[in-house]
Amino acid sequence: TSRVIIDGQSVAIGNAKNILELVRRIGIELPTFCYHSELSVYGACRLCLVEVENVGLVASCSTPPTDGMVIRTNTERTRRLRRMILELLLANHDRECPTCSKNTTCKLQKLAKQYGVDEIRFGKRDIKLPIDHSSCSIVKDPNKCILCGDCVRVCKEVQGLGIWDFAHRGSKTLVTTAFGKDLADVACINCGQCVAVCPTGALTVKSEVEQAWAAIHDPGKTVVVQIAPAVRVALGEEFGLAAGSAVTGKIVAALKKMGVDKVFDTLFTADLTTIEESMEFLSRLENEGRLPLFTSCCPGWVKYCEQTHADMIDHLSSCRSPQQMFGSLIKKHYAKKIGKTPAEVVCISVMPCTAKKFEAKRPEFTTEGVYDVDIVLTTVEMAQMIKEFGIVFNELEPAGFDNPLGMGSGGALIFGASGGVMESVVRYIAGYTGGHEVGRIDFYPARGIQGLKEAEVAVNDRKLKVAVVNGINNAERLIQRLKTGEIMYHIVEVMACPGGCIGGGGQPDINNTSTRIQRLNSIYQLDAIEQVHKAQDNVYVNKIINEWLKGFDTRTAHHDLHTSYVH
Ligand code: HC0
Ligand code: SF4
């Protein structure tokens, strides 16, 4: 077998594509800004350079290993050059670290410390470019961009959108949108995957933390919080817990300590979504309506469908997402029950998602002139508030959700992973066969982080073909095959982010597949121990449907829980 020698140690090449992989295999972590194992190799930052005997300095990420290579990862030259690269990047960087939202999580800052950069020998950058605050979800500060191109590649290669690209040349090079337009005016779907890969403060999440504090401190407001499925298996990572640690009860307890009035669960309206979407599907099936039915809970996907496939909008389920069903119930019904106006109740969502900030601001999701969901905090923003309050998170005693909107089934919990919505719908429609209630249903073909999953389900005497995709690129490929008639499905679940919401742009570090897998596994483990497994068995949901919405399929239910799309 072919081998190389790295720092005196012999290593088999195996299937390694580049030297960097082999270096990592022997337990050496080389610095890099632009290398992501799931994106194409760019080789721009040069930080991962190593010395190869008889060859010289090479970027380890973009150099394939060959038999007999003798490689050294740390030499006088590599150390000097790494430090110089960092100094040059810093010289051209807006160094406002203490007030930057990436402070302490910025890779440039971290590497500067790790490589002992304590002074910068080059002049200071004096141009200040305007910051783009136009998007509901993402803030772009070009003064902090180091041109690693990670955002460019993730947007193109994973989402197929190509919102970001390089413009201009030499020292004027910039990463920007087409014609330098505001982010709010281009086809960005707000998924935040670019924010997640950005190593510095150039792309950050639009924070709503201040608005949340203001609502909590306002004695005239009743503050009601909902927590999305994927948040509970990721927030703990911000407090040093292992990826996938389930911290549901601790998040509830932290919010109560902060003084919010009620903590409810998005799982409740995820169950409601399962029921509404399943009924919509069955009705389309019976009445020869538009099939496949596309799920509509991911606002990134919905925006993509509206702007790219307007001819397929009728395939989208008319169901509002669980976040918006929740907001609608709070503002249209709950407020009344507690004797308040919709404006006196502030609805805060805690979401793994940056696109949910955009969804909440869609003009159709309002009641009596106020937004149904007022504030959307990402998982990371929630963690920031917990830290700011000084709560010792890891020592918190778990607390339970409030009622009546605090209960959800295992089927609702798995919404947070790609395939979860599909599996819940399957649990619902296959849950009754020949009028008989069936027990537990586990639909394994829908699970996992693969980009495309397909399966057949037998329901009574019919065979339903279903597909699950995550990542817009995968969705686009599927749509093309649907359009040519090459394939046909009854239901298609689409989530914009790789792995589904567990890999959302508002989650703690998602730059590694194992983190996503651990969160996903944790979600299914939590589902496995749930007493209530299927949406139809959530007694509270049935109660609210009857009491607030006057039953299934009523005008109120349609008005409050469904929506229409932009053609
Ligand atoms: Fe998701 Fe959702 S599962 S989109 O991925 O459907 O954000 O977690 O909250 O709304 O429930 C995100 C996660 C949600 C919604 C739910 C759905
Ligand atoms: Fe948001 Fe989930 Fe869609 Fe990602 S997959 S954009 S986290 S709703």
Image: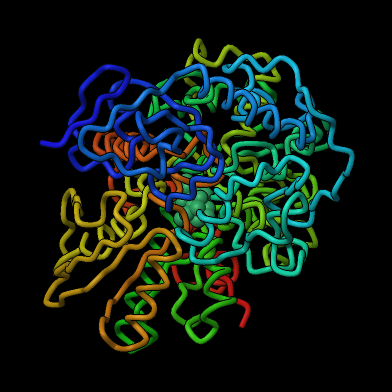
Viewport quadrant of the C terminus: bottom right
Looking at the picture, how far across and down is residue 413, in whole percent?
A: 38, 44
Residue 544 in view here:
no
In this rendering, position of residue 101 left or right of residue 504: right
Image x and y of residue 410, in percent: 32, 43
Where residue 511 sits: x, y (%)? 46, 39
Nearest the camera: 231 or 99? 99
For residue 303, which quarter of the picture? bottom right
- Res. 395 in view: yes
* Screen quadrant of the N terminus: top left
Residue at 47 percent across and 32 percent down: it is 49
Residue 120 drawn above or below residue 439: above
> Looking at the image, which is closer to me, 157 or 289?
157
Q: Is residue 182 left or right of residue 54?
A: right
The answer to which of 179 and 460 lies nearer the viewer is 179
Indicate how the structure is coloured in the image. Answer: rainbow
Give the vertical position of 204 relative to 469 (above or below).
above
* 239 with respect to 101 (left or right): left
Residue lying farthest front?
54
Above or below for 319 versus 372: below
Residue sitting at x 65%, y 59%:
166
